Amino acid sequence: MTISTEQHPREATVVEAAPKQLLIGGKWRPATADRSYEVEDPSTGRALCSVADASPADGLSALAAAAEAQPRWAKHPPRERGEILRRAYELIMSRHEDLALLMTLEMGKPLTESRAEITYAAEFFRWFAEEAVRIGGDYAVAPNGTGRFLVMRQPVGPALLITPWNFPMAMGTRKIGPAIAAGCTSVIKPAHQTPLSMLALAEILQEAGLPDGVLNVVTSRRAGELMEPMIRDGRARKLSFTGSTAVGRKLIEQSADQVLRVSMELGGNAPFLVFADADLDAAVDGAMLAKMRNVGEACTAANRFYVHADVAEEFSRRLAERMAGLRMGRGVSDDVQVGPLIDDAQLGKVTDLVDDAVQHGAEVVTGGGAADGDGYFYRPTVLANVPVQARMSREEIFGPVAPITTFTDEQAVIAQANDTEYGLVSYLYTRDLQRALRVSEALESGMVGLNQGIVSNPAAPFGGVKHSGLGREGGKVGIDEFLETKYIAIGGL
């Protein structure tokens, strides 16, 4: 498979235009001692630019700015909070192409997918702009009739937000949107691999009229060193994290000192069930979405394909044909469908998982190795007869690899699907309505894709069970993560 190395004429322009400093208290400033680090283009392995590398002192300065701004922002009219988000939504959409190109350069995904993410990211601001004025409460007569209950919702307070590299803008707007709408100030730390999209987003929010100190941005290669002092500082009242389960566990432990309110969107190990009566055309289309969105680097990616023995050969053949036909290359070209993995470490992990599966008896139907040349490219891969002993049956792949296992019994495949510590999302394809509902209810996951390969939607609650996380983002409940409930007892009536 050859790799497209096409250049985009605006690459240098969009990188140069993006902020490179920290945003603290409304001011762009360098990191302590002018520390910086390089941001890499994963399609070439070469540096795009350098950005500020925040120290723990910089992080505490950002938290101080958020804490100082919190009382004023909590009292800011909900309508105006919503209008700021709405203006930011419109600015994002007006700069759609440049933001998509910037994302492709730092993360690697094809422009088509980056464009889709920019639209998806902007929708969180539009959604929460409308939710800002719908924060309600309650008034009730006490059961004994001698008093009244007044229940109100108030902002949690300064929030710490940590976002991953795989969706560098959408994971930010999914947290920033409800924080702003609820009246919370925040400090956000984007992943070190993909800081430019978040820095560009912060500049847009400034332009939309967000007051100084409401959003502060700190970029750093040393996430743990930067975040732990802020988490253990009593001024922070909320922590929202998207990333691996291993890191999430550590953050929950650190949050215990100050009893921080936490929401965690963690790892996944999504099963993809195809029953004998499934529409195979729809199932293959759904598999391509569930597996290849973001080059497979998504917590919602289908990780384990369970296909009924009666249709397994046909499904595997069709999926392999589709995977083998994808064009790989630098995502800046409109006809590229598969970009690189994020870095050399991720490429090594995917390679090891596939090698391990083959050693345990899996058969390579297509792909099965890294591509030659620069960048961190791995060929789209389909594996058949993957045994449960293979590591990829238990570990999140985070790459363009579809491992297929056959089944014949419904209860047995449900048990296999649930045999994991994770529970983010499951997918199933069947034309039997009773089976669809029966299996959907039995699957241990926070979300189910029923005859569709994508579940993410700003208007729907996103989140998992078991080791896949705590809380929900998006939908009507997304703003609840940033609100506390206060009850006032009224007597003398």
Image (cartoon, rainbow, N blue to C red):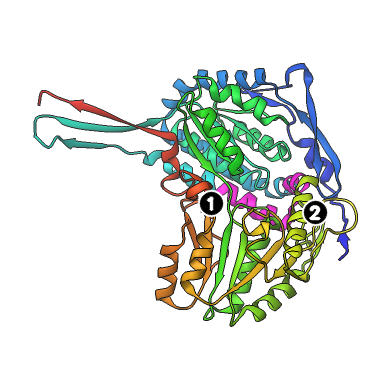
Determine the residue positioned at 48% across, 73% down: 410
Instruction: Using the image, determine if residue 57 lies above or below residue 222.
Output: above
To which quarter of the image does residue 90 belong?
Answer: top right
Q: Residue at x 72, y 64 (%)?
A: 360
Q: Position of residue 340 (x, y in %)?
A: 78, 53
Please report the bounds of the magenta region as a residue range: 102-123
Looking at the image, residue 434 lies above or below residue 221: below
Residue 249 picture quarter: top right
For the residue carrying disc 1, how many other residues have a C-alpha within 10 Å: few (<14), some (14-19), or many (20+)?
some
Tell me the residue at 72%/40% (across/down): 194
Q: Note whether residue 87 is visible.
A: yes
Verify whether residue 112 appears in magenta.
yes
**Side of 155 where 221 appears, left or right:** right
Q: Which badge, 1 or 2, comes first in the chain's sequence?
A: 2
- Asked whether residue 213 appears in the rendered view, the answer is no
Mark 1 and mark 2 in contact? Answer it, CB < 8 Å.
no
> Which residue was labeled with disc 2?
332
Q: Residues within 10 Å of mark 2 (few under 14, many from 20)?
A: many
Residue position for label 1: 421
Q: CA distance from mark 1 to mark 2?
A: 37 Å
- Callout 2: SS: loop
Does the segment drawn in magenta span residue 88? Answer: no
Q: Position of residue 273 (x, y in %)?
A: 55, 69
User: Which image quarter holds the N terminus?
Assistant: bottom right
- Disc 2 residue type (three-letter): Val
Query: Image quadrant for the C terminus?
Result: top left
The amino acid at mark 1 is: Glu
* Magenta span dominant secondary structure: helix
Give percent across and percent down for residue 321.
74, 75
